[in-house]
Image: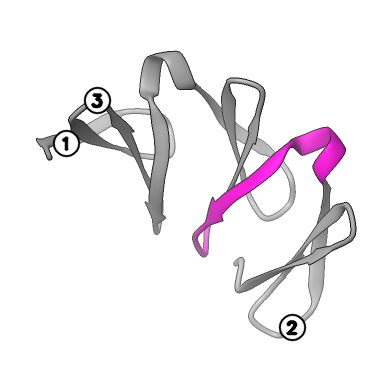
């Protein structure tokens, strides 16, 4: 479980609920940190958002051209905004819902 993150120079350090460092993500390799939930962490590199679990295993890639801009994460769901719509996806990329804003 991801409880906290800390930026240390060019590394994003991930901590669990007990304060133990469980993973380091190199910003040069993984890209810019965008957000996290207790389950996942999202980085942007080029035009791709990539979702990883707390062990660093890649879950899924999301193209900015297809999905839009990362908006938020909650539990096992991720939200993207494209134009005037916000769409919610589950961890496998299945579309769960969409709303006009």
Which label number is shown at residue 97?
A: 1
Q: Does residue 17 appear left or right of residue 70 in this picture?
A: right
Q: Secondary structure at mark 3?
A: loop
Residue that badge 2 annotates = 19
Mark 1 or 3: the one toward you: 3
Residue that badge 3 annotates = 83
Answer with mark 2 or mark 1, whichever residue precedes in sequence: 2
In the current view of this chain or complex, which residue is farthest to the right?
A: 9
Q: Does residue 36 appear left or right of residue 76 in this picture?
A: right
The front one of 73 and 47 is: 47
Q: Position of residue 61 (x, y in %)?
A: 56, 25
Of the 4 image quadrants, the one containing the C terminus is top left
Q: Does residue 40 appear left or right of residue 10 in this picture?
A: left
Answer with mark 1 or mark 3, whichever residue precedes in sequence: 3
Q: What is the spatial separation of the Cα atoms under label 1 and label 3, in whole angstroms?
A: 15 Å
Q: What is the spatial separation of the Cα atoms under label 2 and label 1, in whole angstroms?
A: 35 Å
């Amino acid at each position: 479980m991801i409880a906290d993150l800390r930026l240390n120079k060019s590394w994003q350090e991930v901590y669990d609920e007990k304060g133990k460092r469980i993973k380091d993500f190199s910003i040069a390799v993984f890209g810019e940190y965008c957000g996290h939930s207790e389950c996942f962490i999202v980085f942007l590199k080029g035009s791709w958002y990539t979702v990883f679990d707390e062990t660093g295993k890649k879950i899924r890639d999301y193209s900015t051209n297809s999905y839009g801009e990362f908006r938020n994460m909650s539990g096992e769901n991720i939200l993207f905004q494209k134009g005037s719509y916000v769409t919610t996806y589950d961890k496998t990329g299945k579309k769960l819902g969409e709303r006009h804003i």
